[in-house]
Image (cartoon, rainbow, N blue to C red):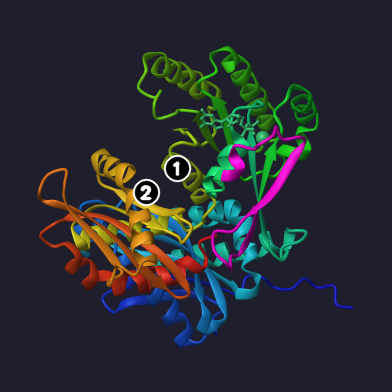
Amino acid sequence: MNDKKPEIIKAVVFSVFDDDGPTPKIYFPRDMEESARLLIAMKTISILMGDAIYQDGSSTSGINYFGILPFPDLKLNGLTYFFLIPDSQARGNAKASTITVLIDESNRVFFYENMKYLRIIIDKAASKVQVTKDFTEIEKIIESLKEELIEFAEELEDPLSTKRQLKILFTGIDGAGKTSFLLGVKKRYSEIIKVLPTKGVFRSNEQIFEQQNSQISIWDLAGQKTYRDKFIEESKFYLYNIDLMFYFIDIQDEERIGESLKLYKEIIYKLRELSEFPSIIICLNKHDPDLKDTKPMKKRIKNVTIDIEKQSEGFFFKIFNTSIFDHWSLISAYSFGLSQLSPNRELFVNQLKQFAKNTNSDAILLLNDNGIILSSYSKSEISEKVFEISAPHYQTLYKTFKEFELLKKDYLISSGITDDSKSVIFKRIIVDQYNLYLLLYVEKEHGIKKVEKNLSDFVKNIKDLIKTYI
Ligand SMILES: Nc1nc2c(ncn2[C@@H]2O[C@H](COP(=O)(O)OP(=O)(O)O)[C@@H](O)[C@H]2O)c(=O)[nH]1
Ligand SMILES: [Mg+2]
């Protein structure tokens, strides 16, 4: 038996866009094939270069994000950090740069599992590169980055578990609507009215795409007092290694809000104790359409929000108002939570932003076949509102028209939205084997023509990102 651990880190490439175009400046191993390092430089830099803000030359600070990119021709997967190096001689006063760490594509779980730590290590090196002028000094920084990454991988006990495991927890006291929410998201309406109080824990899986790198398990916990006590007692088991938590509060039940906030406080306390800091999505649930504008409802939301904000310090959290009678509210909260689990979420938003700029759109949504929002970009709150109101209708219209073969094209357009100069486009796009949908809020004048003109570039860019979405 050979007890030597397999080498995980295959290569590290530092690339810069200079006078010669995308150039691999420093790379390990030193005998890496030229075609391979050029490909890595080209692909990573080209995704960054399209960035609208950078091309404006208006801002160089806001661009630094991570993404996972596949390199099928090399049978490698890369974790890339995109950043800018200030340079007064360059266009936009900065040079687009990337640091890419490469591993065998069959080991890709390694990236997902260790993202948190890898980000810190790479970010640290990139920050040094940004302020270093001397090339041999930069070489040293990249060299020691490589060393640190290899060391990190060697120290892991089981660096290559087969699939990335993600754990999502649904919590909150009994009757807050957790189980109904999960059924509602999946449009299993007939089951909602039959839902019985959950006992213990109910586990299910989430499949965003037919093929995905991660196994996502959802734990729907019972909220009755007896189970709750058990849950807090055995919190190590339930709260350990969670990636995302949904917390439900019945915003109609004035009497039990105190009890609900108390449980939240206990969970937060336990999470801190365990040093677990999952993203948290708070659902102020039963925010039913016929009650949402009433005074007591508004007042309760305000008070609960203040309390939650106070409790949640140090956590990334977001509060949503949800109701099973407003499907979009469920989808928004659920999708936002899931998107927090994607290592490519920043890259996606940037791709949407760029596409928005090229098509004169104020807002864009990217949906999967089940209506989950994979990514969204909007210029303003107003454009966000337009989607909130219209998205579910377009989705239904499109599906219905298609079903009855009333639609010859693969898009729907409506005009006269907000003022006469805007329209909404709902369009199906095919990216590899995936059926995806775009919703765009665009200037009527340019409309679908601009969308179609820029679509192939957009699809090309997200093709690889989609494979590593989750
Ligand atoms: N009015 C209203 N009732 C809801 C909503 N969501 C769930 N319910 C009802 O609240 C009760 C408890 O829901 P359930 O999903 O079992 O809550 P859980 O104990 O948190 O899983 C059920 O009678 C549901 O029909 C909602 O958004 N609005
Ligand atoms: Mg339940």
In the rendered image, which residue does mark 2 sit on? Answer: 392
Label 2: few (<14), some (14–19) or many (≥20) C-alpha neighbours in 10 Å: some
Front in this rendered view, residue 265 or 115: 265
Residue lying furthest front: 404
Is residue 207 shown in magenta?
yes
Camera-nearest residue between 226 and 408: 408
Q: Quadrant of the C terminus?
A: bottom right
Q: Element type at marker 2?
A: helix
Residue, far right: 1
The stretch in magenta equals 190-216
Q: Residue 243 location, x and y as percent?
A: 62, 45
Mark 2 or 1 closer to N-term?
1
Taking the spot 40% from the left edge, 54% from the top edge, the residue there is: 375
Q: In the rendered view, tell whether residue 36 sits above or below residue 11.
A: below
Where the N terminus falls, by quadrant?
A: bottom right
Residue ID for mark 1: 327
Q: CA distance from mark 2 to mark 1?
A: 8 Å
Ligand 1, image quadrant it occupies = top right
* Percent x, y of residue 80: 47, 64
Front-most of 414 and 445?
414
Q: Amino acid at mark 2?
A: Pro
Disc 1 residue type (three-letter) = His
Within 8 Å: ligand 1 and the Cβ of disc 1?
no
